[in-house]
Image (spheres, coloured by chain):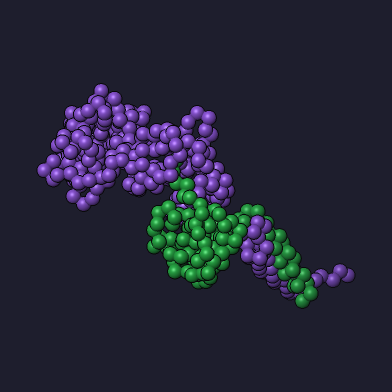
């Protein structure tokens, strides 16, 4: 019995060495073909700013809503509000702040912070 | 007297040794397999060597394209090149300028709006990309300017003027900073009896004269590759005009293509691959006679396509 355990343990050990070698070096795990919903939080935050700036450019609210939906966040209204207020507080005079406030307002999100906010940055648009 | 071993006992011992060997081999194999699969699972799911980070670099292609579009639009709105650069870096694309140029060419083929094309061209130019499409649609960089976006703060910048029919090859230096692109002129309908493109018009059209006339229409036997509608657009002096948009239509659809993307042939050259059994018509979007009944034929050793030459009526074109 003891000899059986030694044999199976030896097999496990050799197998584990081979398995880790394969799993780490030969066929390492990697993410491929992800959607915005799979983005890390920091990337999602930046993606949100891109959505807002793109909306400022093309004024396509449906497309902006679709892009927000692609992030797969059920709490998107709260998240958008929190990110917009953060942006407003940290960079009150930036074009991105204007874009995020405008997107939030157009998506029906209300906040006293928006009532006080007057867009300050002129759109840069084309040379 | 020597005692000989019992043959039965010897056979029994051999049988037992064989059974033990197979038993140990089986156990070893089971342990090996469990060890391999268990370790792979741990290596992938529990202890990956590099943490699995969902970033734009591993986006599905459609999302990567949309990401590029958003970066170009964002750049046009904010003028923040550093932010655009750091966002583009997340794509981890070693051939990013080329990728953006390919995206620009896709926009042209798909007939995306002039705004989208211009913003993408600007992004490509800012990345230092080169290409025929970029030559046509990116703003001209004045001497001393490193990139087109370097001057967004308010110094004099190039003004791209989109001419009728999306001809965006003219980039002029403006003395003053400009906030919005100039789109000239506004497309207006053309009288139906002219039987010409109905999207654009210019002064010539207002007087009933089309800006371009068809000066040649020839059948061309193509022995290598598919038959095409080859279009040459020239100014009044016979020099090829890049950036002229051609509308080709058939019973079930239409498409547009632009001259100038194959400068190795001619600056005013563009081609469209034909399909058998389809009757096409072609015209310049900026105004020309419509050439109908262009069908693919056969010739000795190949297929019969068409070559059309349009020439501007006025020196101004």
B104 or A7: which is nearer to us? B104
Residue in the picture at 18% in, 32% down? B214
Q: Is residue B8 visible?
A: yes
Q: Is residue B135 visible?
A: no
Taking B151 as reference, is B27 left or right?
Answer: right
B300 or B104: which is nearer to us? B104
Count of numbered circles in the view: 0
A11 or A26: which is nearer to us? A26
Q: Drawn colour of chain B?
A: purple
Quarter of the image for residue A2 reads: bottom right
**Residue B317: % across, % down:** 26, 30
Quarter of the image for residue A27 reads: bottom right
Question: Which quarter of the figure is the N terminus of chain A placed in?
Answer: bottom right
A72 or B148: which is nearer to us? B148
Residue that extends furthest to the right in the rendered view of this protein: B1
Residue that extends furthest to the bottom in the rendered view of this protein: A1
Question: Which quarter of the figure is the C terminus of chain A placed in?
Answer: top left
Taking B56 as reference, is B306 left or right?
Answer: left
Residue that extends furthest to the top in the rendered view of this protein: B237
Residue in the picture at 22% in, 28% down? B314
Q: Drawn colour of chain A?
A: green
**Residue B68: % across, % down:** 47, 49
Residue in the picture at 56% in, 49% down? B83
**Residue B148: % across, % down:** 49, 38
**Residue B273: % across, % down:** 27, 40
Residue in the picture at 42% in, 34% down? B174
């Amino acid at each position: 019995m003891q000899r059986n355990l030694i044999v199976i343990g030896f097999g496990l050990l050799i197998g584990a060495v081979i398995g880790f070698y394969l799993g780490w070096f030969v066929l390492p795990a990697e993410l491929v073909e992800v959607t915005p919903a799979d983005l890390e939080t920091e990337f999602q935050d930046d993606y949100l700013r891109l959505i807002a700036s793109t909306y400022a450019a093309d004024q396509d609210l449906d497309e902006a809503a679709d892009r927000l939906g692609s992030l797969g966040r059920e709490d998107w209204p709260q998240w958008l509000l929190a990110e917009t207020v953060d942006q407003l507080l940290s960079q009150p005079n930036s074009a991105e702040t204007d874009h995020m406030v405008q997107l939030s307002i157009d998506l029906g999100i209300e906040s006293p912070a928006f009532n006080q906010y007057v867009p300050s940055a002129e759109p840069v648009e084309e040379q | 007297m020597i005692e000989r071993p019992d043959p039965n006992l010897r056979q029994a011992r051999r049988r037992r040794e064989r059974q033990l060997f197979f038993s140990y081999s089986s156990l070893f194999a089971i342990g090996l397999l469990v060890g391999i699969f268990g370790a792979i699972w741990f290596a992938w799911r529990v202890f990956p060597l590099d943490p699995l980070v969902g970033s734009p670099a591993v986006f599905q292609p459609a999302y990567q394209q949309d990401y590029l579009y958003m970066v170009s639009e964002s750049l046009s709105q904010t003028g923040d090149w550093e932010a655009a650069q750091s966002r583009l870096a997340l794509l981890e694309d070693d051939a990013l300028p080329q990728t953006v140029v390919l995206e620009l060419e896709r926009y042209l083929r798909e007939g995306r709006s002039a705004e989208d094309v211009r913003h993408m061209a600007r992004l490509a130019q800012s990345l230092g990309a080169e290409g025929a499409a970029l030559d046509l649609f990116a703003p001209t960089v004045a001497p001393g300017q490193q990139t087109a976006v370097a001057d967004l703060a308010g110094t004099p910048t190039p003004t791209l003027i989109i001419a009728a029919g999306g001809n965006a090859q003219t980039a002029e230096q403006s003395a003053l900073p400009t906030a919005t692109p100039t789109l000239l002129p506004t497309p207006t309908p053309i009288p139906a009896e002219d039987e010409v493109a109905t999207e654009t018009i210019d002064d010539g059209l207002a007087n009933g004269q089309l800006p371009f006339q068809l000066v040649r229409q020839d059948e061309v036997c193509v022995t290598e590759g598919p038959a095409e509608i080859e279009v040459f657009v020239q100014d009044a002096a016979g020099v090829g005009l890049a950036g002229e948009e051609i509308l080709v239509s058939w019973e079930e659809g239409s498409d547009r293509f632009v001259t100038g993307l194959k400068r190795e042939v001619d600056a005013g050259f563009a081609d469209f691959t034909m399909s058998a059994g389809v009757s096409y018509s072609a015209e310049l979007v900026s105004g020309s006679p419509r050439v109908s009944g262009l069908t693919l034929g056969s010739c000795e050793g190949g297929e019969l396509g068409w070559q059309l030459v349009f020439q501007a009526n006025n020196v101004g074109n």
